Image: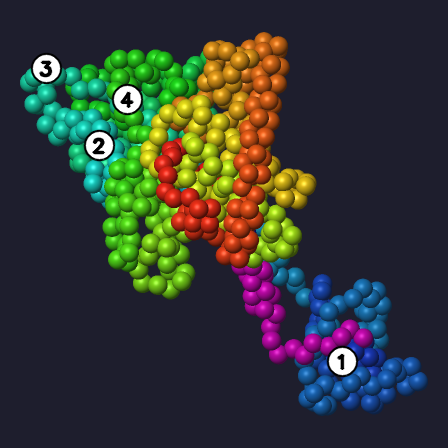
Amino acid sequence: MIALYLGLALLLVWSCQGFFAPTGYRTISYSQFKAHLARGEVERCSVGETRVRGQIVPGLGADGMGLRPETLPAEPEAGPEGLGPFAFQAVRVEDPDLVRELLQAGVEFDGIQPTLIGPMLLTWLLPIGMIVLFWIWMSRRLGSASGNLMGFGKSPARLAADLETQVTFDDLAGCDEAKIELAEVVDFLKNPDRYRALGAKIPKGVLLVGPPGTGKTLMARAVAGEAQVPFFSLSGSEFVEMFVGVGAARVRDLFNQAKRQAPCIIFIDELDAVGRQRGVHIVAGNDEREQTLNQLLVEMDGFEANAGVILLSATNRPELLDRALLRPGRFDRQVVLDAPDLRGRKAILQVHVRGKPLADDVDLEKIALETPGFSGADLANVLNEAALLTARVGAKQISQDLLEEAVEKVIAGPERKSRRLSDDDKRRVAYHEVGHALVAAHSEHADPVHKISIVPRGRAALGYTLQLPTGDQVLQSQSELLDRIRGLLGGRASEELIFGEVSTGAKDDLQRATMLAREMVSVYGMGESAGLMGCAEPEPLYAPATGSRKLDCSNETAREIDIEVKQLLAGAYADARRILEAHRTDLDTVASELLRKETLREAEFRHLIGQDASGGTGSAPEPSS
Ligand code: ADP
Ligand code: MG
Ligand code: ZN
């Protein structure tokens, strides 16, 4: 942008110069001018501040009027026009003797009145003009960034009375209870009089809670779409800005707007950004958030229950919210949107395949079975990935194979065919993965092995073993957890057994096994050292687990827990090794088959180890790499 203005200015300067420099002069060098002068060929000239202009008549001084011939410099190169008289101009150089020489040669000469307009334009008007232009440009940039200087406190809430997208309850699936709860709100917004006549109070605030990607935001938009009322949507972080006091002003403005438009919905997404417990974290900027929260509390009390304004809000960290927000009269109704179960997943898949051409072999039930723990957003992602993969292979319809490929891509990352492993590494990876699979297959409570692969995927996995639970499971027993740990350690046990040495490949497995063992001892009361004492800090309810949890116990207990965890892991490892030693031939056959085919499916694997279908349960699919 600046470059553009500079360019314009330069253009202006050039055109000015062109304008002020009259045409018709032949430009010669100063030395040529002096040579002509010495030969007496200069008829007349005018000497300006920067230029000498005049008329040259070649051959004029041949009559001896000029200087002595021996001092004559060489004949200057003749101009293209040959010897005719011509008007010249030359750039003037510092030459104190010029006047004397001109007098001597008898040239008729005068000065040039310097023009004032040109230099003035260049030195004064142009810079000022550029500064003005720059100023206008800057203020425009700033203006679009932060709105009018006077409008800071105005809420940027988007008013979407008829949502362009027209989301309805039909676009959500697998959350029927939530829909029933919210249908009441929709009904109230449509026929408030019926509820008023009965003296029924509709909650002022409804809080949608649940893990990320379960459709909270979508649900709020669907409520607005169903009720067809004005919908003010704002995210929590938009309240908290650089300037102190803006958040509170925004809350006030938002509620004023809403009250004028009742009945209507106010939706505050990611409420935890403003609604965190007060006085817990003492950091800069806290004041501002507290003020905003206080204003929100005040405003929520400030309107009547049946005024027709309903506040919807969404968060995945309800445990962080200030108590005052959750008391009756404010957000007194909580609607939970949890990760969908098998039926829910199938229904969500059916919502998202609308408008996508499916091949006849597609079995959404099977896909739903393969995706325990997936949220609605994950499932939407699977279908989108499948569509992209289909486009990549140039097919017209999404096939079951590509759908399953998409599921694996979402779980473990994209295939990395270009990652070439040496034959040694490949053999090691194969034995490692088969180790996982075999230990799992010979543990009573482990999830059945769904797939073994040595195609590298994602960032780290060189290969992976995918185990899938047979149904939705909420509780896990002690033996299931133990079998899980054993399966995780199977990879390393196999490497040690076959190669007599371990590699770095088991890093993730060890981490995961340790985390599980730690939880068994310190959270679930399944160990001796902590007994029934739950001594790990609580985890966030709906946010993903971070892995390491702070212990809340004495140092002695912590040490004992460490020792017990170590023993537990060692015991599981010994078990895993024993299983593999007992099935050494299976280990070799399956590994060589895996090296040949790169992936083995459940049926092939079972056939190779001579097992027939057997039951087993577990939770979310986690590939062990
Ligand atoms: P959240 O706000 O809970 O994090 P979103 O509402 O933004 O999640 O959901 C993200 C996307 O996931 C939605 O746009 C939708 O495509 C899909 N999705 C999530 N839950 C569902 C559901 N229950 N039914 C259909 N689609 C869903
Ligand atoms: Mg959201
Ligand atoms: Zn592994």
**Residue 460: percent from the left, percent from the top?**
56, 44
* Label 2 SS: helix
Neighbours of disc 4 within 10 Å: few (<14), some (14-19), many (20+): some
* Label 1 SS: strand
For the residues labelled 2 and 3, the Cα–Cα distance comes to 27 Å
Q: Residue at x 33, y 16 (%)?
A: 325
In the figure, 134 relative to 441: above or below?
below
In the figure, 438 relative to 295: above or below?
below
For the residues labelled 3 and 1, the Cα–Cα distance comes to 112 Å
Give the residue pinned by disc 2.
176
For the residues labelled 4 and 1, the Cα–Cα distance comes to 101 Å
| Mark 2 close to ligand 1, CB under 8 Å | no
| Mark 4 close to ligand 1, CB under 8 Å | no
* Label 3 SS: loop
Of residues 306 and 226, the one nearer the viewer is 226
Is 127 left or right of 606, judged from the image as shown? right
Give the residue pinned by disc 4.
334
Give whichever of discs 3 and 1 has the lower sequence position.
1
- Dots 4, 1 in contact, CB < 8 A: no
- Dots 2, 4 in contact, CB < 8 A: no
Question: Magenta span: helix, strand or loop, mainly?
Answer: helix
Q: Is residue 59 visible?
A: yes
Of residues 519 and 77, the one nearer the viewer is 519
For the residues labelled 3 and 4, the Cα–Cα distance comes to 22 Å
Write down the quadrant of residue 63 in the picture: bottom right
**Residue 247: percent from the left, percent from the top?**
39, 24
Give whichever of discs 2 and 3 has the lower sequence position.
2
Give the residue pinned by disc 1.
42
- The answer to whether residue 46 is magenta is no
In the figure, 127 relative to 79: above or below?
above
Is 477 left or right of 459, judged from the image as shown? left
Give whichever of discs 2 and 1 has the lower sequence position.
1
